[in-house]
Image (tube, rainbow, N blue to C red):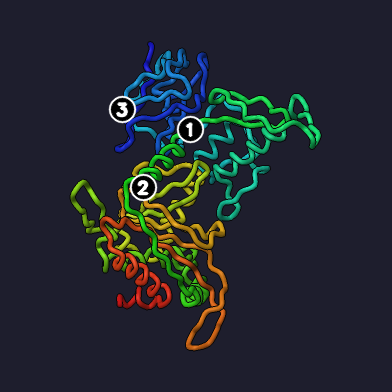
């Protein structure tokens, strides 16, 4: 019996996707639920599973093609006695069963994420040779991809690259080739590569340009003395980790401080819809996280109801999911305000760009020891520059500045977060 392989119902807010990597080719045997192809959307990569046991007979839509819900992308000859999956089965984000036809690995994959296990099975990796960057040395999807890329680059090239003398002719214009095609070396023997943008990168570019062109964005800056919150963290971090099972970081304090400031200045928590202003009565905070595919912003929902431990746990989980590529669309949809931390990469000061339709974003930066005046004396303190970018159409300068001052006061005097003063 021939079964059509269709694109399952896509999550809300996702209209289409791009087929990026067929796992099987015509004639391959597949198992029910086994991932056949990766579907890249604007936010996440989804798996399209086989609807039944059988043999993949035809691939209808090729890699790089854009597809929508219900489109037929291939056909499957069902094995006798197998039961087909319901056609409306929703896609699973980066968590499919490893291919039974992939080379076997002698390493115990227990404890690894589904995405890591799948990559290990597909490439026959000895996971003991893959260095882990996760908590406790845990191997993440990003670690496996980096290992595979390094192994590919280690392969010898087919021909040496010619070396030209320093007095060679003027540099020629770059060679243009179709997308995905290898570019030949220029006259100096230097290589270039042309690759299409990923869906996520294209979406990021689109949203950033939209934020620049459709908002009246302005940024105000301040600096925060981090010593009080650092002293508090150093005093209680061990007890905090023992009780809650998660490390006490600084992001939790900033999330709490932002929520307190948003309560005092509701316009910063609002958004513009046409000629209307929407004042949100809840606090869904987006936390910008770097992933192998680019910047993603998972959402902490109803943060005003969360404890500091709950916030730290959720942020840690989001960070791991971003590395493993297992964030869902629902976890990255919505949000009323965003926090981004360029300081983890060493940034001293920057202007964060709004995440539409939100009207505000807080940028954290690196903490550096600097001389400051304190009670008439010059002292050395760990200082952090912070930036608040806002949409001037809805937020006045006074509100934007005092919002940031409130965040500063809460961090410099953490007792305010406990006493609500």
Q: In which quarter of the image is the N terminus?
A: top left
Point out the frontmost of discs 1 and 2: 2
Query: Marks 1 and 2, how far apart in space?
Result: 39 Å
Question: Could you tell me which secondary element the residue under label 2 belongs to?
Answer: helix
Q: Residue at x 43, y 47 (%)?
A: 296
Vertical order, 6 against 224 (above or below): above
**Foreground residue, 294 or 179?**
179
Question: Could you tell me which secondary element the residue under label 3 belongs to?
Answer: loop
| Quadrant position of residue 107 | top right
**Foreground residue, 137 or 43?**
43
Q: In which quarter of the image is the C terminus?
A: bottom left
Q: Which mark is residue 97?
A: 1
Q: Mark 3 points at which residue?
A: 88
How many numbered dots are placed on residues in this image? Answer: 3
Q: Residue at x 49, y 64 (%)?
A: 247
**Foreground residue, 226 or 389?**
389
Q: Mark 2 points at which residue?
A: 211
Question: Could you tell me which secondary element the residue under label 1 belongs to?
Answer: loop
| Label 2 environment density (alpha carbons within 10 Å; few <14, some 14–19, many ≥20) | many
């Amino acid at each position: 019996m021939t079964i059509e392989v269709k694109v399952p119902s896509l999550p809300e807010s996702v209209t289409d996707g791009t087929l990026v990597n067929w796992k099987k080719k015509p004639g391959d045997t597949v198992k029910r639920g086994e991932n056949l192809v990766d579907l890249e959307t604007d936010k996440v990569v989804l798996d399209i599973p086989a609807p039944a046991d059988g043999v993949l007979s035809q691939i209808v839509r090729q890699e790089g093609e854009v597809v929508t819900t219900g489109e037929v992308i291939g056909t499957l000859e069902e094995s006798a006695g197998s039961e087909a999956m319901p056609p409306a089965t929703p896609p699973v984000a980066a968590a499919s069963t490893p291919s039974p036809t992939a080379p076997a690995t002698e390493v115990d994959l227990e404890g690894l994420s589904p995405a890591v296990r799948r990559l290990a099975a597909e490439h026959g990796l000895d996971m003991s040779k893959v260095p882990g960057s996760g908590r406790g040395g845990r191997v993440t999807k990003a670690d496996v991809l980096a290992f595979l890329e390094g192994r590919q680059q280690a392969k010898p090239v087919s021909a040496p690259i010619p070396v030209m003398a320093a007095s060679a002719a003027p540099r020629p214009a770059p060679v243009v080739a179709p997308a995905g095609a290898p570019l030949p070396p220029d006259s100096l023997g230097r290589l270039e590569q042309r690759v299409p943008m990923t869906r996520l990168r294209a979406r990021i570019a689109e949203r950033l340009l939209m934020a620049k062109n459709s908002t009246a964005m302005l940024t105000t800056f301040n600096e925060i003395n981090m010593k009080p919150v650092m002293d508090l963290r150093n005093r209680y971090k061990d007890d905090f980790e023992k009780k809650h099972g998660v490390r006490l970081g600084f992001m939790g304090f900033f999330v709490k401080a932002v929520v307190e400031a948003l309560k005092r200045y509701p316009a910063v928590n609002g958004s513009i819809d046409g000629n209307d202003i929407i004042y949100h009565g809840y606090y869904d905070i987006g936390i910008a996280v770097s992933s192998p595919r680019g910047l993603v912003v998972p959402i902490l929902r109803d943060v005003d109801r969360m404890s500091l431990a709950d916030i730290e746990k959720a942020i840690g989980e989001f960070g791991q999911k971003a590395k493993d590529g297992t964030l869902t669309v629902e976890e990255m949809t919505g949000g009323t305000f965003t926090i981004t931390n360029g300081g983890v990469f060493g940034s001293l000061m920057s202007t964060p760009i709004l995440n539409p339709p939100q009207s505000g974003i807080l940028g954290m930066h690196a903490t550096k020891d600097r001389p400051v005046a304190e009670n008439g004396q010059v002292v050395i303190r760990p200082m952090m520059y912070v930036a608040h970018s806002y949409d001037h159409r809805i937020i006045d300068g006074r509100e934007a500045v005092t919002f940031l001052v409130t965040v500063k006061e809460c961090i410099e005097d953490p007792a305010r977060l406990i006493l609500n003063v």
